Image: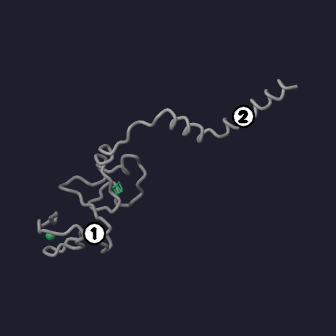
């Protein structure tokens, strides 16, 4: 059972407003839309991935006390994936250097044509 961050009343995970203090617990009145809240004085942005990578353009940044998109840096670090394999790195490089790959292919084809003659 969860509790209200303001009055500690017991709430269900889908509770939209606290039945005791009426604090909004979900965004836009929708039970499936979490509304993250800062704890204490620290703004959510201080520990948010989208502040760290400078991709957030919400007007409340960097002082957001509530946010629907907050994503904790710590959660991302906990879920950190293992480093990509050499094959994945190679395919990523090839995808990002298609021009070079095409040029290399043309050079090889030209060389093959010259050698065949
Ligand atoms: S997504 Fe929300 S918490 Fe994260 S940086 Fe933007 S405003 Fe701050
Ligand atoms: Zn409450």
Instruction: Work out which quarter of the rendered image holds the N terminus and state it.
Output: bottom left
Q: Nearer the viewer, residue 4 or 84?
A: 84
Instruction: Kindly identify the residue that appears in the image at 18 percent across and 72 percent down.
Output: 18
- Secondary structure beneath label 1: loop
Position of residue 72 measured from the top left corner of the image (x, y, whole percent): 30, 51
Would you name the residue on which mark 1 appears? 26
Instruction: Kindly identify the residue that appears in the image at 65 percent across and 40 percent down.
Output: 98
Tell me: 79 left or right of 37.
right
- Secondary structure beneath label 2: helix
Tell me: 39 left or right of 54.
left
Specify which label sits upstream in the sequence, 1 or 2.
Answer: 1
Position of residue 56 measured from the top left corner of the image (x, y, whole percent): 40, 54
Ligand 2, image quadrant it occupies = bottom left
Q: Nearer the viewer, mark 1 or mark 2?
A: 2
Q: Are marks 1 and 2 in contact (CB under 8 Å)?
A: no
Tell me: 91 left or right of 9.
right
Q: Residues within 10 Å of mark 2 (few under 14, many from 20)?
A: few
Does 35 appear above or below 103? below
User: Could you tell me how many numbered marks the image carries?
Assistant: 2
Instruction: Work out which quarter of the rendered image holds the C terminus and state it.
Output: top right
Locate residue 26: give its quadrant: bottom left
How far apart are labels 1 and 2 at the CA level?
A: 55 Å
Instruction: Kindly identify the residue that appears in the image at 39 percent across and 60 percent down.
Output: 58
Would you name the residue on which mark 2 appears? 105
Residue at the limit of the structure toward the right, as seen here: 117
């Amino acid at each position: 059972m969860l509790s209200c961050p303001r009055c500690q009343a017991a709430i269900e995970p889908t509770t939209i407003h606290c039945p005791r203090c009426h604090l909004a617990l979900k965004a836009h009145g929708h039970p499936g839309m979490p509304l993250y809240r800062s704890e204490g004085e620290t703004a959510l942005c201080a520990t948010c991935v989208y502040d760290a990578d400078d991709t957030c353009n919400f007007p409340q940044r960097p002082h957001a006390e509530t946010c629907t998109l907050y994503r904790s840096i710590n959660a991302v670090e906990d879920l950190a994936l293992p480093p990509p394999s050499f094959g994945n790195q190679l395919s990523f490089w090839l995808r990002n250097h298609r021009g070079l790959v095409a040029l290399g292919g043309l050079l090889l084809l030209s060389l093959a044509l010259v050698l065949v003659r």
